[in-house]
Image (cartoon, rainbow, N blue to C red):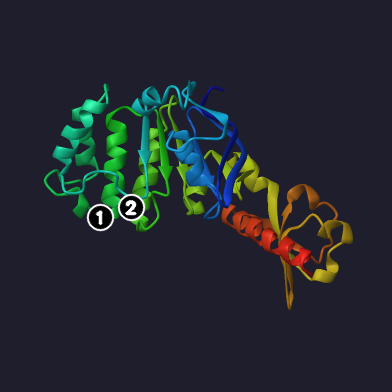
Amino acid sequence: MENILEISGLNKAYDGFALNDVSFSLPKGFIMGFVGENGSGKTTTIRSILNMAKIDSGKITVFGLDSVSDTIEIKERLGVVFDSLYLAEHLNVKQIEQQLKPFYKDWDSGEFFRRLKEFDLPDNKKVGDFSKGMKMKLMIAIALSHKAELIILDEPTSGLDPVARDELLDILTEYIENDNRGVLFSTHITADIERIADYVTILHNGKVWYTGTKDELTESYAVIKGAENDIPAELKSRLIGFHAYRNGFDALIKTDDLAGIPDTLEYEKASIDEILVYIAKEDKYEKNERHS
């Protein structure tokens, strides 16, 4: 399987934060959900892919090209959708199109205006007056109009209403029907990831906590609940994000560790959202244990 994006041993340090040996890959023809709590390193990773941040070490390739030495060629073939508009907001879309097309050798004006019509975007209104959902669709239209082979989205659904979010997911689903394309989708809304992603990478404290298929992730973890006294001693050390309260406890557990648990303990398949919550709880639990 050919990868459209490969990151190997990425390290990038700032004051108070560092990406540490981040490695993952996205095969052609698939959507990867890129998730983690605020400050986990998602935006720094995306900035590194785009050569907007100078990495300390490691290697990033996009379309088999080096992210640093081949950055111009990569950006010709790349579409990026941020959570805010990066265009001159006093212009309308016709003026925006005139500004953009000299930068892309494969720019297709017909496709651009076809997408504007499809997305119900007016061509005579200042883009600064667009709603957040309209701005997001405009950035998608731009990516599709220069035949982007990889679209990277950094929190594009934050602040969008459910209808606009649903429209975005439908657009991405249609886009990825071409097996030579890929999508890296960073978002806090894990329901969107569960709906459309094939792969998931979880960043936590600047490190890769998980990377692989979405199905493998959700099949590998469960939420376990019950009375704390019913937890076998050898099992408790393997619980993730253990949380005790007056009437019992809850925690995340690998499904491989469920064999032989007492009938008094209940468990159910974990969602991606729950996995992220328990990863964060584990940090607090370990910190409390160290200071107890």
**First-in-chain label (2 vs 1):** 1
Q: Is residue 140 left or right of residue 193?
A: left
Residue at the spot 54% in from the left edge and 22% down from the top edge: 2
Q: Judging from the image, what secondary structure is the residue with disc 2 in? A: helix
Image spot of residue 14 (x, y percent): 54, 46
Q: What residue is pinned by disc 2?
A: 164
Asked if marks 2 and 1 touch (Cβ < 8 Å), the reply is yes
Residue at the spot 47% in from the left edge and 29% down from the top edge: 29
- Residue at the far front in the pictured view: 15
Q: Nearer the viewer, residue 55 or 43?
A: 55
Q: Is residue 285 left or right of residue 127?
A: right
- Residue 109 lies, with reference to residue 201, above or below; the image says above
Image spot of residue 178 (x, y percent): 41, 27
Measured in 3D between alpha carbons, the distance from the residue under mark 2 to the one under mark 1, in whole angstroms, is 10 Å
Image spot of residue 118 (x, y percent): 23, 40
Q: What residue is pinned by disc 1?
A: 131
Label 2 amino acid? Answer: Ala
